[in-house]
């Protein structure tokens, strides 16, 4: 998909990070229900927890630690809906 409206969360199955990935996915789908065309959960290994928008890495746990939902929402918003207000999350 080339329109920048696909989000992928790759998470480590060995670390049991599916609940964390699913919770973040829920947060993103709730916030961007009209803007996203797809959100995928991708099982991985080796401690991976990476968020991509249209194949661009916007968050990598190895470099930035675990993300707060607000930080990821801002990064996703900047790519899929630049004019969208995130309400209290923007403050």
Image (spheres, rainbow, N blue to C red):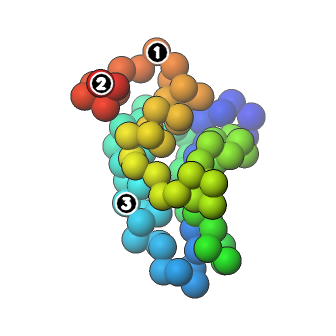
Q: Secondary structure at mark 2?
A: loop
Residue that carries the numbered disc 1 in the rendered image: 83
Name which residue lies at 48% across and 58% down: 66
Residue 29 shows in this picture: no
Residue that carries the numbered disc 2 in the rendered image: 91
Instruction: Name the side, left or right, on which 66 lies relative to 49.
Output: left
Q: Are marks 3 and 2 in contact (CB under 8 Å)?
A: no
Figure quadrant of residue 14: bottom right
In percent of width and height, residue 82 lies at 51, 19
Q: Quadrant of the N terminus?
A: top right
Instruction: Name the side, left or right, on which 68 lies relative to 36.
Output: left
In percent of width and height, residue 19 lies at 40, 71
Residue that carries the numbered disc 3 in the rendered image: 23
Q: Quadrant of the C terminus?
A: top left
Q: State which tag comes first along the sequence, 1 or 3.
A: 3
**Badge nearest the viewer, 1 or 2:** 2
Figure quadrant of residue 5: top right
In percent of width and height, residue 53 lies at 63, 41
Label 1 to label 2: alpha-carbon separation: 15 Å
Name which residue lies at 72% across and 45% down: 55
Assess disc 1: are there few (<14), some (14-19) or many (≥20) residues with their C-alpha within 10 Å of its C-alpha.
few
Q: State which tag comes first along the sequence, 1 or 2.
A: 1
Q: Secondary structure at mark 1?
A: loop
């Amino acid at each position: 998909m080339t329109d920048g409206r696909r989000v992928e969360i790759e998470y480590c199955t060995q670390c049991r990070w599916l609940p964390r990935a699913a919770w973040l996915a829920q947060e993103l789908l709730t916030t961007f229900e009209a803007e996203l065309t797809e959100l995928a959960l991708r099982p991985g290994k080796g401690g991976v927890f990476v968020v991509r928008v249209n194949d661009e890495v916007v968050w990598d746990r190895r470099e930035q630690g675990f993300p707060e939902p607000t930080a990821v929402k801002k990064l996703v918003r900047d790519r899929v809906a630049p004019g969208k207000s995130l309400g209290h999350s923007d403050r």
